[in-house]
Image: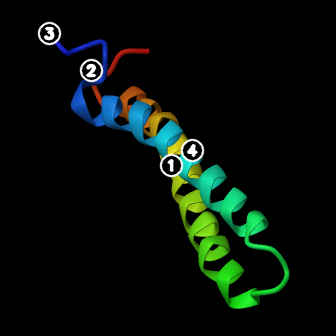
Amino acid sequence: MPSTTGGPRQALSRVSAPLLAFLTALFAFWAVAAGDDAPAARAVPAALALAFGVLAVLAAAHPLVFVRRRRRRPGGHG
C-alpha cells in the first residue's frame, strides 16, 4: 500500500522550502544592513539572497509537481 505522506522526498521538500526562505531573508537583511559605504560588501549577500530565493521557490513548487505526477501515474491516487 502506498504511503499517504509522500515519503522522505516530500518530507525533505517540507523542510527545505522554509529553511531556504529563512536563509533568503537572512542574506537580504545582511545586504541591507551592510550600508552604502561598501558596495562590494553588499553584493555578496545580495547574490546569496537571490540564489537562495530561487531555490526556495523551486523547493516550494516541488510538492505541486510531485502530486501532479503521482496523479498521472497508473494506479495513482486522486
Could you say where residue 1 lies in the image, as x and y percent from the top left?
14, 9
User: What amino acid is at disc 2?
Assistant: Gly
Mark 2 falls on what kind of element?
loop
Q: Are marks 3 and 4 in contact (CB under 8 Å)?
A: no
Task: Answer with mark 2 or mark 4, whichever residue precedes in sequence.
Answer: 4
Within 10 Å of disc 2 (Cα), the crowding (few <14, some 14-19, many 20+) is few
Q: Are marks 2 and 4 in contact (CB under 8 Å)?
A: no
Farthest-out residue, left: 1
Within 10 Å of disc 4 (Cα), the crowding (few <14, some 14-19, many 20+) is some
Could you say where residue 30 lies in the image, as x and y percent from the top left?
67, 63
Of residues 61 and 33, the one drawn nearer to the viewer in this rendering: 33
Q: Residue at x 23, y 31 (%)?
A: 8
Q: Nearer the viewer, mark 2 or mark 1?
A: 1
User: What amino acid is at disc 3?
Assistant: Met
Q: Is residue 48 above or below residue 27?
A: below
Task: Answer with mark 2 or mark 3, whichever residue precedes in sequence.
Answer: 3
Q: How is the image coloured?
A: rainbow
Q: Residue at x 71, y 68 (%)?
A: 31
Q: Are marks 2 and 1 in contact (CB under 8 Å)?
A: no
What residue would you read off at disc 3? 1
Q: Is residue 34 above or below residue 43?
A: above
What residue would you read off at disc 4? 22
Mark 3 falls on what kind of element?
loop
Q: Are marks 1 and 4 in contact (CB under 8 Å)?
A: yes
What residue would you read off at disc 1? 20
